[in-house]
Amino acid sequence: MKFSKYFLWIGLALMIILSFYLSYLIWANPTIEGQTLVEETEESQAHDEEEEEDYIAAEDVFLPIKAVYKTEDQIQASNTENLLEDLQADISQASFNSLNVQSYDSTKQLVQQTRMSDGIEMDYASSFPLEKYIDFFNLALANEGNEEINSLTFQLVQIDFTEEKIRFINKDEQLSAEADIQSSLDGIKNILNEDSVDWYDVVQDERLDYFEYFNDQPVKLKKFSYIASSRPYTVFRDSFFTNPDNLRSNDDTDNLNIYDGSESMVIEPDNQRVDFQGNTSEEEEFDPYTDSYQYIRKLGTNYGSIRFLDSMQNTLDYHIFVEGFPVFSDTEEGKFSVEFSDTSQEDQRSVEIQANLNMIQVPIPSDSEIEVPSGKEVLEDLYYTGADPEKLHSLVVGYSWENIEDTGVVDLEPAWYVQYGNSWHKSEDLMQQLQESEE
């Protein structure tokens, strides 16, 4: 009995010592300069074995941001993500004849020739290449060898039920590409009439914009609250580096530096920013959409719904979406910016990806709502305060990321956002800037 009690105390002592040692390994995380970076975590090991089908599909990333359903009696809009996915899936299964590109002398003429009384319209916040739309959504639209079609970009997709046509409209360059739809439209019409779709009434005022549809009255939208967390940097490491298994690190500075040959990543712990830099091969023709997607798709569902929002020159921005609306942040949370630039080597192009480790994770139940003014009113106010119509590219409802200080909670509040020039602004902030510039 005495011996068993003796061994019991020895075992207890060993367990306490082991506990302290494991705590030291977890929290101290001892490393030496220049050693190979190894993450002994289940998440990292699981990522190495991740199958390609777990990646984000291109048809999910490059969805339009809104659908407008127009009939003789009513015009409604929806940002419901499932609706957009179902519509695109049905369009992908349709059959068409060849595309025909038409240019017009004025925006007014373009509007007259593409006006429809019964159909749907899907909008992008930024011009999108028709060639990539056909590729990503696997549409049966012939475009091989047609340089005019391959170079065309558009902001609007129309499915005209009356004329049974699909149209791609570039409102900036007064161009449209259209093709006859040779298959049944019943599937698309059934999707539009499903009870699960969240529609809201919209109007069009051609005095303000020939193509935009806005809510005429203020709308109450949900305010969301989440407990925020910081994702492990290994998520970005494994997604962005060509060979994430053989990396080195340098922790002599306040920032964490990870590198391997021509690729490097800096993580700033103070603001959770991530900056990756590397090179892409130019063995194939450069395509910023496909090339940037190769990085974004590997993030999987770690950040929820990640979707393309806009492109400016050789920079593409992807945002997380909540309830079908993009999330904006003053400190770039929820945003993934991919920029390409030329290098001194003919067969390479440099890439820089800026992101943030912070993410929304656990929803906090709430019934709070915030009233969003009508889009028509916002656009009128922007013009009244001196906004240049040539710089005003897009107006969308988004969610503003607001960190609640010292709580670990993030509020997502709905607001109007304006793509003005080369950047996005909250509408009231842009109005204030315009007013101050005139004083």
Image (cartoon, rainbow, N blue to C red):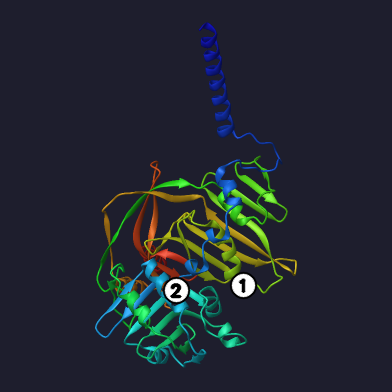
- Residue 164 image position (x, y, % from top left): 39, 89
- Which residue carries the number 1 mark? 287
Q: Residue 89 — which label?
A: 2
Q: Quadrant of residue 350?
A: bottom right
| 395 to 429, vertically: above or below | below
Q: Nearer the viewer, residue 129 or 86?
A: 86
Secondary element at tag 1: loop
| CA distance separating discs 1 and 2 | 24 Å
| 420 to 95, vertically: above or below | above
Q: Nearer the viewer, residue 192 or 381?
A: 192
In this view of the protein, can residue 176 be seen by the observer?
A: no
**Residue at the (57%, 87%) spot, across then down:** 148
Type of the residue with mark 2: Ala
Query: Is 249 placed left or right of 395 in the picture?
Result: right
| 151 to 102, vertically: above or below | above
- Is tag 1's residue or tag 2's residue first in the polypeptide sequence? 2
Type of the residue with mark 1: Asp
| Number of numbered tags placed on the structure image | 2
